[in-house]
Amino acid sequence: MPFEIVRNNLVNMEVDAVVNTANPNPVIDSGVDSEVHAKAGAELLAARKKIGYIDFGAAAITSGYGLDAKYVIHTVGPIWRGGSYDEEQILASCYRSSLALAKNHQCESVAFPLIATGNYKFPKSLALQIAVREISSFLIENEMQIYLVVFDKDAFELSEKLFKSVSSYIDENYIRSTMLEEYGNDSLHDSSLKTRWDSDRTTSGAQNEEDYKLLIEECVELSICAAPTVEAEELSEMLENLDAGFSETLLKLIDRTGRKDSEIYKKANIDRKLFSKIRNNLDYKPSKSTALAFAFALELDIEETQDFIGRAGFALSPSSKFDVIVEFFLINENYNIYELNEVLFAFDQPLIGA
């Protein structure tokens, strides 16, 4: 996918350029700056001294030296002073300036840290919003693989309102669905069953998970055995009257929007090469992530999404935390795939896109 949030150490990213959160003066600062210089070697500081002072919100570029990246883009983030000193505008400028440099040097991939959230104390949730906004805006007009790299969960923070909303929806849907599957309809009304469920999960979770898997396998076997037989003539008729497949349906839905192909696949966080494969192969079988990405780009409602991904052999299930989060966004008509990926990342779920 063109934009991806990953958990890694920035200095280990194998990309064309890594973005370094630099001190405005040609000295080695702590945090990311220190790690970048440590791996790149003394030549990086010598090159940085030749550049001299870098203004807040501006960026400069050097070779990567000992890093796996070809270039280092040095940008100076704002020091947080309450938000009344153009901190947001300066941070946005850091991303725009860095991406412009990457583009001018024909970079095909670039890795960013969450700029200014360390020593400069910029609020993480607001920094994340600005980073996603600027990167996604850039990708509307440009082709580039961009990574937002966070070292651990402490370096990543959703807005409190969004986190609470999603957490509440998961509690009401995912947990209730799991209780229903394990203990039946009475579990939704019987507090003693909920206590038992909580106890089971904490004291003997592994055993319950194993029992649950065996139960699922038994149900699958029973459903297979109970499946009605289909005569050869009936099968032939069914095959002749198949609904349109995923690729054909996707192209029809894009035509329905009246928008360009590029607008849709970029909004879906899908790269041009993959979209070309889908367009040129009506039998293409996408991943669930890819199918859902296009559903969001097309702004389908939940029923339309179920039908659309069903053509690729997928469904949304209340027993999957991933699916429940996706459903939350669909029900709330929030089709911002980048914001969805922020939430999925925060809840340790796979991201949407290619």
Image (tube, grey):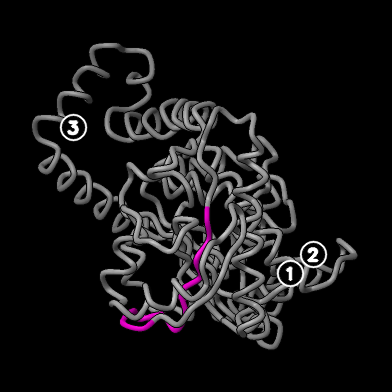
| Residue at left offset 52%, top offset 55% | 76
Q: Is residue 109 shown above or below 290?
A: below
Residue 296: x and y in percent read 67, 54
Disc 3/disc 1 C-alpha distance (Å)? 42 Å
- The location of residue 90, given as percent across then percent down, is 63, 47
Residue beneath label 3, please?
Answer: 201
Badge 1 vs badge 2, beta-carbon distance below 8 Å: yes
Dot 3 amino acid type: Arg
- The label number, if any, that marks residue 28 in the structure image: none
Which residue is the site of mark 1?
A: 249
Identify whether 82 is placed above or below 243: above
As shown in the figure, which amino acid type bears the numbered disc 2? Leu
Which span is picked out in magenta? 65-76
Earlier sequence position, callout 2 versus callout 3: 3
What is the x, y in percent for residue 155? 37, 45
- Density class for disc 3 (Cα within 10 Å; few <14, some 14-19, many ≥20) is some
Circle 1: residue type: Thr
Q: Residue at x 70, y 40 (%)?
A: 333
Q: Nearer the viewer, residue 192 or 230?
A: 192
Which is closer to the viewer, label 3 or label 1?
3
Placement of 103 over or under 75, stated as above or below: below
